[in-house]
Image (tube, helix red, strand yellow):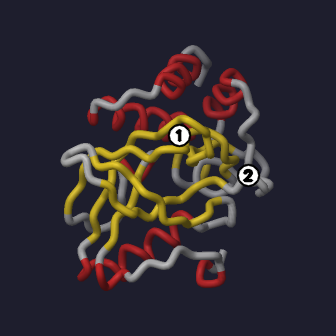
Amino acid sequence: MDWAHAELAEVDPGKGFWVFAYGSLMWNPGFTVESRTLAHLPGYRRSFCMSSIVYRGTPEAPGLVLALDRAEGEGCSGVAYRVAPECGEEALAYLRERELVSSAYREVLAEVHLDDDGSHRTALAYVMDRDHAQYCGTLSADEQAEIIARAAGPAGSNREYLMNTAQALHRLGLEDAALFDLVERVRRLPL
């Protein structure tokens, strides 16, 4: 996708900015980070609700990747990265190239709560567009596990993506009961 024509959040990269990470950005940000802290984004949950046809699957055999899915009364814990002004342009271009590979994510500015000092910051976040054909938020945990156990794409296996995310959450001391349950379901399935 040509992200230059996508609906983009108004970010001035020359002033630096914050990015909220909840999935692979936690363990593989891919851009220069000035600082990081644990953070919480209210109103969304981490969910395997996006069909992956580029990174962890193919159009013929889609995988599943995490997305921020709207969830009234819930919240998602993750990492907030601060991007320095001198790295802003490069980081923003990288994020858009990586995250807006299809139009399934919407790039938004959201208020996150930082754990280190209790402050709130406006952060760039990539949230699921529920109207997009790649949205699959109604799959059961068993259906998700079956897909994740077998799918693979140019970036590697879907199983590896799940395990790397679970390891990152453990290292950070973050809980996600649904994701950890999914790990156990996938482990019980054959490679």
Looking at the picture, tell me which residue is in the foreground, 109 or 190. 109
42 or 58, which lies in front?
Answer: 42
What quarter of the picture does the N terminus occupy? bottom right
Q: Quadrant of residue 111?
A: bottom left
Q: Please determine whether, in this image, residue 1 is positioned above or below residue 58.
A: below
User: At x 54% / y 65%, what residue is drawn?
Assistant: 108
Left or right, residue 101 beside residue 133: left
Position of residue 162 measured from the top left corner of the image (x, y, whole percent) = 50, 35
Residue found at x 61% / y 45%: 69
Name the spot of residue 138 as percent of width and height, x first: 76, 34
- Residue 62 percent across, percent down from the top left: 72, 46
The residue labelled by disc 2 is 130
Q: CA distance from mark 2 to mark 1?
A: 14 Å
Residue 150, placed above or below residue 60: above
Q: Which residue is mark 1?
A: 46
| Res. 27 in view | no
Question: Of the residues shown, which amino acid type is indicated by label 2?
Answer: Arg
Residue 184, position in %: x, y?
A: 51, 17
**Residue 167 to residue 129: above or below:** above
